[in-house]
Image (cartoon, helix red, strand yellow):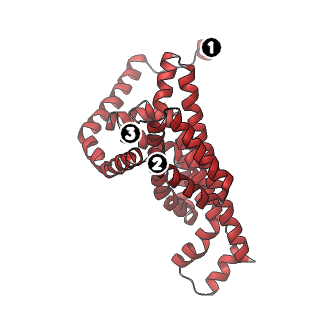
Amino acid sequence: MEFFTKFPVMERIALLDMKKGIDLSFRQFSREYGNGIEAFFDPLLFFLVWLEKLLLNSPWPIIILAIAILAWFGSRSWALVVGSALAFMLIGYFGMWNDCMATVAIITVCTTLCIAVGIPLGVLMSKSDRAEKTILPVLDMMQTIPSFVYLVPILMLLGIGKVPGLIAVCIYAAPPIIRLTNLGIREVDKETLEAIDAFGATTWQRLTKVQIPLALPTIFAGVNQTIMMALAMVVIASMIGVKGLGVPILRAISNQYLALGLMNGLAIVALAIIFDRVSQHYGKRIQKHREGRNL
């Protein structure tokens, strides 16, 4: 009856040996290939450091003017432009400007990298059912596995610094843009595709002239979600060497500073609202433009 009351477990020594074997194998892999992997990400690190220095060393009125211009270009809403400018001015007034610029830099680089990798992967998934079946479980794992779990191998490979934090944020934030690119292209009307095929369009013309333009609203929804998820990882990324608004929040958690944690948390919320509204408005404008052209 003991079999039914006590779950059978691997012997403790065998389990420990298995864990040690995995750890030793990965450490050996890190020693042999860690430097090469780190060198591969050097251009990304250079871009991140350059952008962060650019934002920190530029006069604050120019940064706010640039933000207002981008908000107007994306939304065509004066309310959003004024709100964005006021939000950044308040962030600076309360002494969070440098941390905010570091956060904007990491979010910009992460979003750019996710778009550069995610859209081609989404296109590949939309063109191949086999690729979709292969990539979907990986995306499921990326979205469901706790972020602290994949921090361990990243830290063992690359140590503490900006690049490990960047990779961790991208792993967490990339799935939405991949999924929604795949979904948007697959949902393009078949009659439209048949019409473009009747005119003798090539596969490349079909993709670039019809499928991606018609899928842009869905793709921008993916970009929006990627930005939101990247912002959600700011605090965790700060634990492994990424500067930004997450660092004061970690300090506030460690020392129980309510005001410090609340102010920096609200700054992250403000950034999230600005990025969310601008990207949403831009996606809606693209959709209306496409509908107008179709009419």
Q: Is residue 183 above or below residue 85?
A: below
**Label 1 amino acid?**
Thr
Task: Name the quadrant containing residue 12.
Answer: top left
Give the number of the mark in front: 1 or 3.
3
Give the number of the mark in front: 2 or 3.
2
The secondary structure type at the circle numbered 2 is helix
Task: Name the quadrant containing residue 195.
Answer: bottom right
Residue carrying label 2: 110
Q: Nearer the viewer, residue 221 or 33?
A: 221
Residue 295 lies, in percent from the top left, at: 75, 77
Give the number of the mark in front: 2 or 1.
2
Query: Which mark, residue 292?
Result: none
Residue 180 lies, in percent from the top left, at: 61, 56
Instruction: Rate crowding at label 2 as few (under 14), some (14 to 19) or many (20 or more) other CA atoms within 10 Å.
Output: many
Residue carrying label 1: 5
Q: Is residue 37 left or right of residue 187?
A: left
Residue 166 lies, in percent from the top left, at: 42, 43
Q: Is residue 226 left or right of residue 290?
A: left
Q: Is residue 24 left or right of residue 132?
A: left
Residue carrying label 3: 164
Going 36% across and 31% down the picture, which residue do you hit?
22
Q: Sequence order check: which comes first, mark 2 or mark 3?
A: 2
**Label 2 amino acid?**
Cys
Q: Nearer the viewer, residue 293 or 188?
A: 293
